[in-house]
């Protein structure tokens, strides 16, 4: 896999970029959601996101998302029912001319048993995120990258790379998956 062949700093993992928020007591972290974000703010975020998800107007979607604090570049297109994070939309950045496909989810939080975590999601310039894809907190999708439909993006996608699957992995142009250490020598079998 192209970016896995390059040396990576161990601290460059998605989990290491997430901000951790411990929650006290015996209950799971979701029971403490009001401490993460005020109920009125979540209700406003939810109302704006529902309106944007169902609006056919790209301009209205962008306007509503910017009002929620998202960074949305010029020429961005959100498909119907695309859903940015309801709790932390301000942690979402979608750069110029990117496409976020139908029913895609951009998550900036994870509620766990003893903590919740938050992290930015960045969709780079001219990147495409296919229908039904889920992007986890702390992930950056590079410029001109492509995420196939129904993929689960658990780590960064390098620029100009196509990924697919659960979890999303790089895809070769001939449709096959790249395997660790596999190299194409150009010879036919």
Image: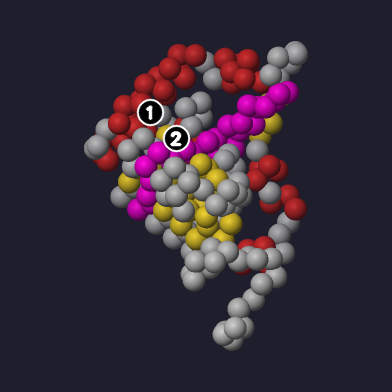
- For the point 43% across and 17% down, which residue is it? 43
- Bin the neighbour count of mark 1 within 10 Å (Cα to Cα): few under 14, some 14-19, many 20 and up: many
- The image position of residue 102, as x and y in percent, is 37, 42
The kind of secondary structure element at disc 1 is helix
Give the residues drawn in magenta, as a range.
97-121
Instruction: Check disc 2 and report the residue beneath it.
Output: 84
- The image position of residue 68, as x and y in percent, is 40, 29
- Bin the neighbour count of mark 2 within 10 Å (Cα to Cα): few under 14, some 14-19, many 20 and up: many
Can residue 6 be seen by looking at this rendering? no
The kind of secondary structure element at disc 2 is strand
- For the point 31% across and 27% down, which residue is it? 51
Residue 181 vs 162, above or below: the answer is below
- The image position of residue 151, as x and y in percent, is 51, 48
- For the point 66% across and 72% down, which residue is it? 182
Residue located farthest toward the front when viewing the structure as drawn? 189
Can residue 48 be seen by looking at this rendering? yes
170 with respect to 114 (left or right): left
3 with respect to 45 (left or right): right
Asked if residue 110 lies in the magenta stretch, the reply is yes
- For the point 42% across and 24% down, which residue is it? 45
Distance in Å between CA atoms under marks 1 and 2: 7 Å
Q: Using the rendered view, name the quadrant where residue 84 is placed.
A: top left
Toward the viewer: 138 or 1?
Answer: 1
138 with respect to 75 (left or right): right
Q: Using the rendered view, name the quadrant where residue 101 is placed.
A: top left
Instruction: Check disc 1 and report the residue beneath it.
Output: 49
């Amino acid at each position: 896999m192209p970016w896995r062949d390059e040396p990576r700093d161990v601290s460059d993992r998605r989990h290491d970029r997430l901000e951790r928020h411990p929650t006290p007591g015996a209950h799971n972290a979701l029971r403490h959601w009001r401490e993460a974000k005020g109920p009125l703010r979540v209700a406003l975020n939810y109302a704006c996101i529902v309106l944007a998800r169902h609006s056919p107007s790209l301009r209205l979607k962008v306007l509503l998302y910017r009002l929620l604090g998202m960074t949305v570049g010029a020429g961005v297109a959100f498909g119907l029912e695309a859903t940015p994070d309801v709790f932390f939309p301000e942690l979402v950045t979608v750069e110029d001319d990117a496409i976020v496909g139908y029913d895609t989810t951009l998550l900036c939080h994870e509620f766990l048993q003893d903590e919740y975590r938050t992290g930015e999601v960045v969709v780079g310039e001219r990147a495409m995120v296919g229908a039904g894809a889920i992007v986890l907190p702390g992930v950056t999708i590079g410029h001109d990258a492509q995420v196939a439909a129904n993929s689960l993006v658990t780590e960064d996608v390098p620029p100009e790379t196509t990924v697919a699957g659960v979890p999303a992995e790089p895809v070769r142009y001939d449709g096959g998956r790249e395997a660790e250490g596999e190299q194409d020598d150009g010879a036919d079998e």
